[in-house]
Image: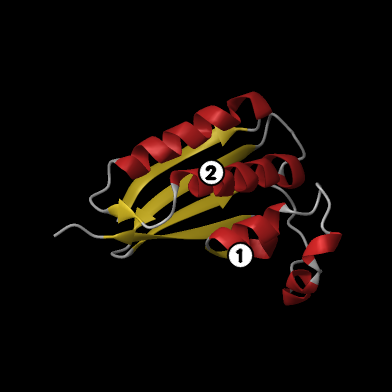
């Protein structure tokens, strides 16, 4: 079931507001997140900045799309950009953590904190956040 769907302009000044909007919608679900709110905020921060910076190249004419779906024991957050994508391979995960600099940590952080998959040549990330459903 879709619980939120909206497009946002590419602007770094809007990032915190976008994250707050997403978290506000998630807080309305029936169920308890099985992830600390600080971790959720970090995941969203990395995914949104990646979409704006690497995907849309800070082009204010391009949008990022955010959709949130609740699927029983999981919240799926889908973030898409209008960029060209990137070459994503499983070999990316073999980079030793000690070699990651400030410019290469986003995907590793996201994958460490939640289940995530990239689609559409990397222009879409699906973030799976576990929830405990209320009965």
Residue 129 seen in the figure: yes
Mark 2 is surrounded, within 10 Å at the Cα level, by few (under 14), some (14 to 19) or many (20 or more) other residues, namely some
Residue 40 x %, y %:
49, 48
User: Image height check: is 124 above or below 38?
Assistant: below
User: In the drawing, does residue 99 fall left or right of residue 76?
Assistant: right
- Which callout, 1 or 2, points at the residue further toward the start of the chain? 2
The N terminus: image quadrant = bottom left
Which residue lies at the image location 45% right of the left edge and 44% below the top edge?
Answer: 37
Which residue lies at the image location 28% right of the left edge and 64% below the top edge?
Answer: 72
Give the numbered dot on residue 65.
Answer: 2
User: In the drawing, does residue 9 fall left or right of residue 4?
Assistant: right
Secondary structure beneath label 2: strand
Residue 55 x %, y %:
72, 47
Name the outermost residue toward the front: 98
Mark 1 is surrounded, within 10 Å at the Cα level, by few (under 14), some (14 to 19) or many (20 or more) other residues, namely few
Give the numbered dot on residue 110.
Answer: none
Asked where in the image residue 85 lies, by quadrant, the reply is bottom right
Decide which of 49, 31 is in the foreground and name it: 31
The residue that label 1 is drawn on is 119
Name the outermost residue toward the top: 13
Secondary structure beneath label 1: strand
User: Image height check: is 133 above or below 96?
Assistant: above
Q: Count the labels in the image.
A: 2
Residue 81 seen in the figure: no
Residue 35 x %, y %:
43, 55
Please, which colouring scheme is shown?
secondary structure
Residue 75 x %, y %:
38, 57
The C terminus: image quadrant = bottom left
């Amino acid at each position: 079931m879709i619980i939120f769907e909206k497009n946002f302009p590419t602007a770094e000044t809007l990032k915190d507001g976008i994250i707050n909007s997403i978290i506000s919608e998630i807080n309305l679900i029936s169920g308890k997140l099985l992830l600390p709110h600080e971790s959720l905020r970090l995941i969203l921060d990395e995914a949104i900045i990646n979409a704006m910076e690497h995907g849309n190249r800070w082009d204010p004419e391009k949008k990022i799309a955010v959709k949130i779906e609740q699927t029983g024991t999981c919240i799926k957050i889908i973030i898409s950009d209008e960029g060209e994508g990137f070459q994503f391979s499983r070999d990316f995960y073999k980079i030793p953590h000690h070699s990651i600099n400030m410019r290469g940590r986003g995907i590793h952080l996201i994958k460490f904190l939640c289940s995530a998959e990239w689609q559409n040549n990397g222009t879409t990330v699906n973030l799976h956040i576990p929830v405990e459903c209320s009965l």
